């Protein structure tokens, strides 16, 4: 199975991500149903477990330094359900992007059902 990778230079941080009018997630150009790698706006990713977990401030600072120097090396995992994006992992990377004021973050997006979402929320 092949994955589509969107590579954006670190110097290019001001761009838009377009979506279909029906709210469908990015399509996989290889025709497969596996995850795709895309840059998503931070404000389009719901973080339902954010209030229940605390991040290690030292780890966030280290990630901020790394992201400033070489960019994000490992995308966060995002679940797309009915056109809505949910992030359950990558909490430190997500916070580092927020604190750096970056508008987008590289994500590995996979589609899921409402049942899959309920499983993650348990």
Image: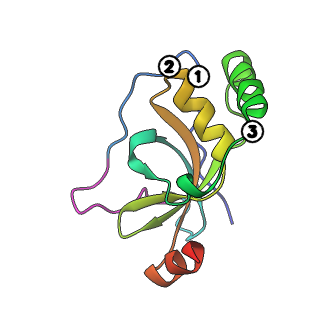
Front residue (pair 71, 31): 71
Front residue (pair 62, 55): 55
Q: Residues within 10 Å of mark 3 (few under 14, many from 20)?
A: few
Residue at 56 percent of width and 22 percent of height: 100
Q: Quadrant of residue 81?
A: bottom left
Measured from the top left, where is residue 42 in percent x and y? 45, 40
17 horizontally vs 59: left or right: left
Q: Is residue 30 above or below residue 118?
A: above
Rendered-image quadrant of the N terminus: bottom right
Q: Quadrant of residue 87?
A: bottom right
Q: CA distance from mark 1 to mark 2?
A: 5 Å
Q: Regarding mark 2 in the picture, which secondary structure is present there? A: loop
83 horizontally vs 94: left or right: left
Q: Regarding mark 1 in the picture, which secondary structure is present there? A: loop
Range covered by the magenta-colored residues: 19-28
Quick check: is 121 in the magenta stretch?
no
Is the magenta region chiefly helix, strand or loop?
Answer: loop
Quick check: is 25 in the magenta stretch?
yes
The earlier-in-sequence mark between 3 and 2 is 2
Name the residue carrying label 3: 56
Measured from the top left, where is residue 56 in percent x and y? 75, 38
Name the residue carrying label 2: 12
Q: Regarding mark 3 in the picture, which secondary structure is present there? A: loop
Measured from the top left, where is residue 111 in percent x and y? 50, 69
Q: Find residue 9 and name its label.
A: 1
């Amino acid at each position: 199975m092949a994955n589509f990778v969107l590579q954006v230079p670190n110097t290019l941080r001001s761009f838009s991500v377009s979506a279909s009018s029906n709210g469908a997630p990015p399509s996989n150009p290889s025709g497969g149903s596996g995850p795709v790698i895309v840059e998503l706006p931070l404000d389009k990713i719901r973080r339902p477990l954010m209030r229940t977990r605390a991040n290690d401030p030292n780890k966030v600072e280290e990630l901020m330094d790394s992201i400033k120097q070489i960019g994000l090396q490992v995308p966060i995992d995002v679940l797309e359900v009915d056109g809505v994006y949910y992030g359950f992992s990558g909490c430190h990377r997500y916070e580092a992007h927020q604190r750096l004021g970056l508008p987008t973050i590289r994500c590995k997006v996979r589609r899921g059902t409402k049942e899959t979402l309920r499983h993650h929320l348990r």
